Image (tube, helix red, strand yellow):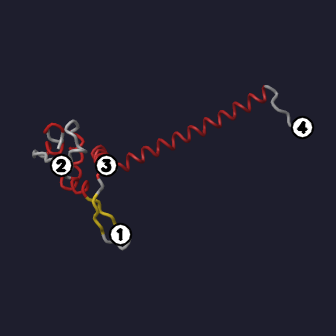
Amino acid sequence: MAVHGSRCAACKYLRRRCPQDCIFSPHFPSSNPQRFAYVHRIYGASNVGKMLERIALLKLDGFENDQRVPEFERSHVADSLHFEAKCRIEDPVYGCVGFISRLEHQIHSIESEIAMTRALMMMYESSLNRQKGGPSEH
């Protein structure tokens, strides 16, 4: 339950009492209601609760095996759900894949800029060496 008897963002959003053992409370504080609103809009409260509680692991034989998510991993699950939901709301077509593509494009552009800068530096160094009568090759 949230601090001093107040409800977490999830319980406020769902208009329900926040139980002592509320699975949402540690990950969706009342101070950030938008965080739960994004996740709820994309996944639904029931599915989010299930994902925070259990994780489906695919076995090699193709059958699913549900296991409890350790407490220390739940914050990572909640953060991931929030990020993916926010990306999906901001970009309904590509979601987080669009975000990743933009980052990859930025990396490629910066790598190209670095390569061009290095080439210019080598050209200037070469020109400077020629002007100074650089090392003679005999």
Q: Nearer the viewer, mark 2 or mark 4?
A: 2
- Quarter holding residue 51: bottom left
Q: Nearer the viewer, mark 2 or mark 3?
A: 2
Q: Do the residues bearing badges 1 and 2 touch, measured as CB atoms within 8 Å? A: no
Between disc 3 and disc 4, whose residue precedes? 3
Q: Residue type at mark 1: give it.
A: Lys
Q: Position of residue 61 (x, y in %)?
A: 36, 74
Which corner quadrant holds the N terminus?
Answer: top left
In 3D space, how far apart are the residues under numbered discs 1 and 3 (Cα atoms)? Answer: 25 Å
- Nearest the eye: 21 or 56: 21
Residue picked out by circle 1: 59
Q: Position of residue 22 (x, y in %)?
A: 18, 49
CA neighbours of label 1 inside 10 A, class few (<14), some (14 to 19), many (20+): few
Between disc 2 and disc 3, whose residue precedes? 2
- Quarter holding residue 125: top right
Q: Do the residues bearing badges 2 and 4 touch, measured as CB atoms within 8 Å? A: no
The residue located at (29%, 60%) in the rendering is 55
In 3D space, how far apart are the residues under numbered discs 1 and 2 (Cα atoms)? Answer: 30 Å
Report the number of discs.
Answer: 4
Q: Residue type at mark 4: give it.
A: His
Q: Residue type at mark 3: give it.
A: Glu
Between disc 2 and disc 4, whose residue precedes? 2
Q: Nearer the viewer, mark 1 or mark 2?
A: 2
Residue 22's label in the rendered image is: 2
Residue picked out by circle 3: 84
SS state under label 4: loop
The residue located at (24%, 48%) in the rendering is 39
Residue picked out by circle 4: 138
| Whether residue 92 can be seen here | no
